[in-house]
Image (cartoon, grey):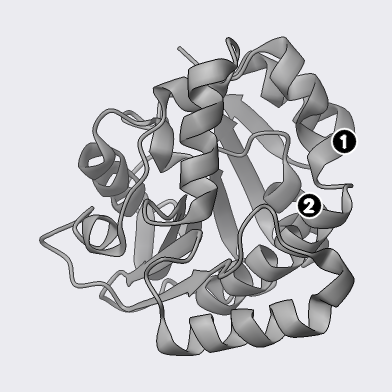
Amino acid sequence: MSAFSKRIADSYDSWYKSRLGEFVDEIERKVVMDLAKPQKNEKVLDLGCGTGIYSLLFLNMGLKVTGIDQSDFMLEKARKKTNKINFIKADAYNLPFPNESFDLVVSVTMFEFLDDPQKGAREAYRVLSPGGRLVICVIGAKSTWAKQYREKAKTEDESPYKAARFYTLEEVLNFIPEVSYSDYSIALHFGPDADLNNKELLLKKEMHGQRVKDDTGGFICVRWDKQGNKKSK
């Protein structure tokens, strides 16, 4: 059952229009795209697509996009944005696709809500074509962002984070223990109380944190490459 209620789905996109939301989204988006390296005409699965934020980004880059989520409310929002993406309600543990269906699988802040992240990651890897990339991004467990979400979960009745678990870098790298990761990035080296009136200082701190890969960052992304020859189109 999805942790995202109708009220949360209705207000989800509004955070990304706030000053902090726009700033965070810009940083996260660059990290995701730098790792994912999406290419025009590739088939991409947006795993835990929510309201379709990343699905639309991939569509606008010329990819063939499928989005899945467990929340009817989030999918309803996504479908209202475009009819050019196949949005499906599906279980991340049992994806309704054959082996090797996608060139790229991307999941942004969904694995926090899985009881068995290894099972979910292996299933995502199963539908990946040889030469394809799997990118999983989560909220870093050591970050002030995770601390804030934990506190909200204690006080807000409808907080989706009541059902969430946050992960360290080491834990994410172990989502598919039998497959070596290819690369990773850590972003959001400032907290939710950041002073946006001094973006230059924030960006300087952010770039340093990303460069040294400080594991206290709030956004951890890991990529696994599937070995084998890439399928011809």
Dot 2: few (<14), some (14–19), or many (≥20) neighbours within 10 Å?
A: some
Vertical comparison of 73 with 128: above or below: above
Depth check, front residue: 157 or 45: 157
Vertical comparison of 233 with 8: above or below: below
Can the viewer see residue 3 in this picture?
Answer: no
Q: Residue at point 56% right, 17% down?
A: 155
Which mark is on residue 147? none
Can the viewer see residue 206 in this picture?
Answer: yes
- Can you tell which quarter of the image residue 89 is in? top right
Quadrant in which the C terminus is drawn: bottom right
Q: Residue at point 67% right, 87% down?
A: 204
Asked if residue 14 lies left or right of residue 73, the reply is right
Question: How far across and how far down the image is residue 101, in percent?
Answer: 43, 51
Asked if residue 49 lies left or right of residue 163, the reply is right
Closer to the observer: label 1 or label 2? 2
Residue linked to disc 1: 81
Depth check, front residue: 96 or 8: 8
Residue linked to disc 2: 21
Q: Amino acid at mark 2?
A: Gly
Question: How far across and how far down the image is residue 213, in percent?
Answer: 41, 81
Question: How far across and how far down the image is residue 74, in percent?
Answer: 69, 24
Q: Amino acid at mark 1?
A: Lys
- Can you tell which quarter of the image residue 43 is in? bottom right
